[in-house]
Image: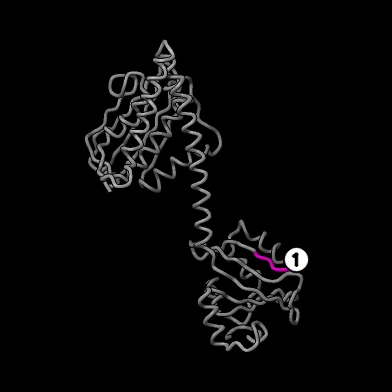
Amino acid sequence: MEGYSLPVSTLFLEGWPAKKVSLALEAGGVALWTWNVDTDRFTMDERAFGLWAVPTSETVTFDELSSKIHPADRDRVRAGFNATRSIHGPYEIDFRIMIDKEVRWISARGQGSDAGIVGRIMLGIFLDVTGRKQVEEANELLAGEMSHRVKNLLAIAAGLAALTSRSTETASDMARELTQRLTALGRAHDLVRPLPGEETKDALLGDLISVLLAPYDDMGAFSGRVRVSVPRMAVSEASATTLALVIHELATNSLKYGALSSDAGTLDVSCAPHPTEVILVWTERGGPPVKAPTGQGGFGSKLINRAVGTQLGGTITREWLDEGVVVALTVQKDRLSR
């Protein structure tokens, strides 16, 4: 193959025509390389040079390739290649490379312990495994998010039980009201995530927030300690789902640590009219003293920040006052309706 230091016949089964080998490698997205263990230089085929986005040449040094490797992976890759000399059998090293601002995942594979070495040259392949890595990362993120949501649901159930016990005198009354509140949570979920076969439609912002917060109000939305005052505007299903995630996260935190954990606590959700933006302000008062968290925050905070920034294209800020936390969510109006 052009640009490769060894004839194809030394790399593949004897009798395979070079053209068929080339087509098979192209179909599999396989890039070839050799590594001279004495000079520390790589010889690669054209597909490998394209994968690394480096100019085609007869050889390339490990340091020249290292400049493309993600800084967090660079030392690990060097150590991994050095370790292949003592590895018995096949090995695989996955790492990231940077092509401008794009991140690609590369899998370097070969045979360790100098197996099959020819003239002090080790052989191997590069594979672009970016798609697989993105799926793995998405699955890990989903698993973390599901775990967080399950924990939140348990915290909500415990908090609602405590909330209900303060406003009822008998076990039967408590069971009835707690069931009503848990049922309201189910209705809120159905509102933003219709069942298969059901018609989807836009929700009104005020109705959405009121339904989501009704289970946390001792006397029901609009009439108790939870007050919602927002302009009349439509919210698409996709935006409503994201808003529901944010509202639930804020309500869960309030129920555990903030105003909703106290008999005297109040919550106001308001939105002043604006021609192009929706600025939703979440204001807690009367709860226990609150303090700004230290560090980068927990999974819930990261979840909210990611949802608001990525899915709504907005921003979220928090102000930790002695009398309670104030959260401001800013989103462009046209993003809520699409």
Return the x and y of residue 274 as percentages of the image width and height. Answer: 24, 38
> Which residues are the magenta region?
83-92
Return the x and y of residue 133 as percentages of the image width and height. Answer: 53, 59
Return the x and y of residue 134 as percentages of the image width and height. Answer: 50, 57
| Residue at point 61%, 62% (across, down) | 94
Return the x and y of residue 305 as percentages of the image width and height. Answer: 44, 42
Depth check: 189 or 314 in front? 189
What amino acid type should be assigned to the residue bearing mark 1?
Ile
Inspect the magenta stretch and tell me whether residue 85 lies in it. yes
When asked about the image quadrant of residue 278, the answer is top left
Q: Is residue 68 above or below residue 117?
A: above
Depth check: 102 or 236 in front? 236
Number of numbered discs visible in the structure rendering: 1
Depth check: 164 or 39 in front? 164
Q: How is the image coloured?
A: one colour
Q: Is residue 81 above or below residue 314?
A: below
| Residue at point 39%, 28% (across, down) | 182
Element type at mark 1: loop
Decide if residue 303 is on the left or right side of residue 115: left
Inspect the magenta stretch and tell me whether residue 314 lies in it. no
The residue singled out by tag 1 in the image is: 87
